[in-house]
Image (tube, coloured by chain):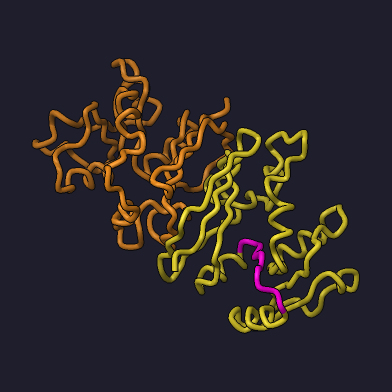
Chain colours: A orange, B yellow
Amino acid sequence: MDGYIANKNGGLDWLHSIPNPDQNDMGYESFIKHIDALVMGRTTFETVCNFDIDWPYSKPVFVLSRTLEAIPEKYEDKAELVKDSLTNILKEINQRGYSRLYIDGGATIQSFLKEDLIDELIITTIPILLGGGALLFSELPEELEFKHVESKVFLDEIVQNHYQRKR
Amino acid sequence: MDGYIANKNGGLDWLHSIPNPDQNDMGYESFIKHIDALVMGRTTFETVCNFDIDWPYSKPVFVLSRTLEAIPEKYEDKAELVKDSLTNILKEINQRGYSRLYIDGGATIQSFLKEDLIDELIITTIPILLGGGALLFSELPEELEFKHVESKVFLDEIVQNHYQRKR
């Protein structure tokens, strides 16, 4: 609720603090079907690589990084490294036929927002104040207005709001 | 949406960015009927004093301030200055028969949250990213879990979430 997406120790356990016995995916599968590719930052990529699960994405993944030299061999057929300005990266990805992009990771979302490159926001809120950690949003050069599309409540506890950029 | 409650210039105009021709009060009147008194910080008090409207509150107002010497004469019958620790202030206000308190103002809400003195949160979100300014939430000494009570959408644009502290 206070805008943090990882707690003070970088922890994500709070994401599973609401009991979900029937594994309600809160729209995730239908959202993923709807997109062409993912764009994520290095931190998110490495976090996913370190999850104790199989590679979770069924769509191409582009990893933004200035520091990473190459995608580890194990993930070479899953993810592709991109290094350029966001507008150039988007141009290239779009030209390759991927137009609906899921942008993930705090720093990456922030970079895209700073250049007003986000068309839709789906924000899922768990009723906890983490009180510190990594923030979803950061300072922007200008205010950005959105339009509310819909709100859903999952598991009686989790609120998901869908917004569209007003242009 | 990004947690700011005043923009980079302290401005509150964005609060009125959604057209509201029928002056929907989004539950405000019924909420105010339901409370016994308000507790607000000096900044909020002075902001309200400077509004170009009559005094807007029908319930007693307690103003928290370390720096204010006295409530200006014009507001002496409306507001009362309190200077003490939050727990002592609450004890005194409660003993005087006011138990349902509306806590207002960013810094004041933050102080109450830091001492885990908030039982309910009603957060109303306008679909705009301000990208800077005064934040509603701040760092906390510990995580605070809440329970989702209800979500409402007003004017097709404004989402209001009601949460209760899990104790």
Q: What residue sits 56% from the left and 66% below the top?
A: B110
Q: Residue furthest right?
A: B74
* Residue A156 falls left or right of residue A167: left
The answer to whether residue B131 is above or below residue A17 is above
Q: How far across and down, in percent of the image, does residue A58 sit?
A: 21, 28
Residue B131 position, x and y percent, is 55, 45
Q: Nearer the viewer, residue A65 or A62?
A: A62
Residue B98 located within the stretch drawn in magenta = yes
Which residue is drawn at the image coordinates 50% and 71% (left, top)? B116
Image location of residue B32, percent across then percent down: 72, 58
Choose between B105 and A94: the one closer to the eye.
Answer: B105
Q: What residue span does the magenta drawing correspond to?
A: B97-106
Residue B122 placed where, x, y %?
Answer: 58, 55
Q: Where is B109 relative to A29, above or below?
A: below
Q: Is residue A77 left or right of residue A145?
A: left
- What residue do we see at 66% from left, 79% from top? B94
Q: Quadrant of residue A49?
A: top left
Indicate left or right for A15 with B96 as reference.
left
The question of residue B50 being in magenta is answered with no
- Placement of A70 over or under B89, stated as above or below: above
Q: Nearer the viewer, residue B152 or A88?
A: B152
Number of marks in the rendered image: 0
- Identify the image quadrant of the C terminus of chain A: top right
Looking at the picture, does residue A139 appear above or below residue B105? Answer: above
* Point 65% across, 62% down: residue: B105
